[in-house]
Amino acid sequence: MKSPYRGWRRLVGAARYSWQGLQAAWQGEAAFRQEVWVLAVLVPVAIWLACTPLEFVLLVGVWLWVIVVELLNSAIETLVDRIDADYHPLAGRCKDMASAAVLLSIVVATMVWIAMIWEKWT
């Protein structure tokens, strides 16, 4: 079925749904809140550390990517819990893999930050 909304109405609706998703993550996901607080600390550090706009975008963007992966992880966990509240090995594996994606995104972000700091001080 085609959406009756097009153009600006569709964009406004999409923005509203996105905002609702961010609110739901903030209210219901401690890890999301922690990662947003880390971003709040990292942005001023990135302003100080970055020598170019590209470096700033890289430093902030890599942590925004962590937040994106956390949102996807939370969505997967919510969906798995919605489908069946009872434990199932496949559900556990699905949640574990989504969590592993968050961990790997944090590892990559940490590597980028360490490399940028190393570059600045060597």
Image: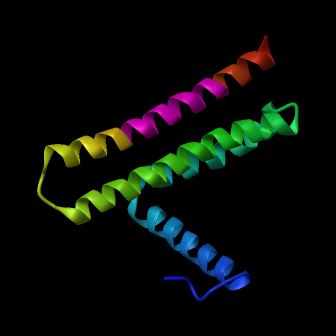
Q: Is residue 95 left or right of residue 109?
A: left
Toward the viewer: 110 or 94?
Answer: 94
Q: Quadrant of residue 11?
A: bottom right
User: What residue appears at the point 24 percent right and 41 percent down from the top-left corner?
Assistant: 93
Q: How is the image coloured?
A: rainbow
Q: Is residue 108 rendered magenta in the image?
A: yes
Toward the viewer: 121 or 21?
Answer: 21
Q: Percent position (x, y) of residue 48?
A: 81, 35
In this view, which residue lies farthest toward the bottom? 4
Magenta residues?
Answer: 99-112
User: What residue appears at the point 68 percent right and 85 percent down from the top-left corner?
Assistant: 9
In this view, which residue lies farthest toward the front? 1
> Eyeballing the image, is 105 above or below 5?
above
Q: Is residue 64 left or right of residue 73?
A: right
Q: Is residue 5 rendered magenta in the image?
A: no
From the image, give the main secondary structure of the stretch colored magenta: helix
Q: Percent position (x, y) of residue 14?
A: 60, 75
Q: Percent position (x, y) of residue 49?
A: 79, 31
Q: Percent position (x, y) of residue 88?
A: 13, 49
In this view, which residue lies farthest toward the top? 122
User: What residue appears at the point 51 percent right and 34 percent down from the top-left corner?
Assistant: 106
Q: Quadrant of residue 60?
A: top right
Toward the viewer: 61 or 40?
Answer: 61
> Eyeballing the image, is 59 above or below 37?
above
> Eyeballing the image, is 103 above or below 115?
below
In this view, which residue lies farthest toward the right? 52
